[in-house]
Image (tube, grey):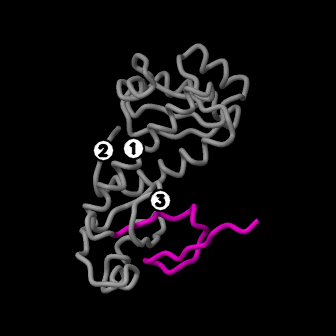
Amino acid sequence: MMYPQRTCIGCRQTRTKSELIRWSWSPSLGVKIDLEGRLPGRGGYTCLSLSCWEQALKGHRLNRVFRKPIPIPSLDELAEQFLHQSHRKIGSLLRAAQEAGQGISGKKVLSEQLKAGQVRLLLMARDIAEDLKGQYLDLCRKEGIRVRFLPASKRELGTLLGDGWRSALGILGPHLPPKIEGILEGIKNFTVKMPGSF
């Protein structure tokens, strides 16, 4: 099966469309980061890399992509757009996991599922207690479970899941972990420009 290919404005490498970030331009909105691929207007693509974004903003690259002279936004402005959309996107993915029974939290239940090797990805709040973090990490190492830290506090994670404070969330199914990890990697790359949380 062939997947749609696009070329990065910055590094000029061709990749599958799903690996790239869409930039859109319209007279009413200007240049916008379009994680969902739904904004109107012409589109161009970049890798999820700060260096590619810096290259894309140089010279007349965007003018060529959008086929007319346009006001060039700042890197800080685009990074802020990306982080805002990323936090919203990952929040919706975690809620979807919870609603579908693919996201589990609570120390007892989560520990049992980790020991049973049922968790595909463990997500921990940025302010999780050190002793609990150590317990979870030990279990994940034994079972070969991937671990990522969220840019959210325990309070923010709990609010997101419609519950009390939550230190961690285990993802059970095979489909959501790659999407979640991809977004978290992007947040990690761009937080240097614009720190944020959910």
Q: Which residue is mark 2?
A: 196
Per the model, the C-alpha gap separating discs 2 and 1 is 9 Å
The amino acid beneath tag 2 is: Gly
Q: Which residue is mark 3?
A: 37
Instruction: Indicate which label's residue lies in the foreground, 1 or 3.
Output: 3
Instruction: Indicate which label's residue lies in the foreground, 2 or 1.
Output: 1
**Residue ID at (51%, 65%):** 20
Instruction: Indicate which label's residue lies in the foreground, 2 or 3.
Output: 3
**Residue ID at (44%, 77%):** 9
Say which element carries label 3. Answer: loop
Question: Looking at the figure, which quarter contains the C terminus?
Answer: top left
Does residue 88 belong to the magenta stretch?
Answer: no
**Residue 196 x %, y %:** 30, 44
Say which element carries label 1. Answer: helix
In the displayed structure, 189 sits above or below 148; it is below
Over which residues does the magenta segment extend? 1-25
The amino acid beneath tag 3 is: Gly
Of callouts 2 and 1, the N-terminal one: 1
Q: Which residue is mark 1?
A: 87
Per the model, the C-alpha gap separating discs 1 and 3 is 16 Å
Which one is in front, 169 or 6?
6
Disc 2 and disc 3 in contact, CB within 8 angstroms: no
Question: Looking at the figure, which quarter contains the N terminus?
Answer: bottom right
Which one is in front, 146 or 2?
2
The amino acid beneath tag 1 is: His
**Residue 4 x %, y %:** 63, 69
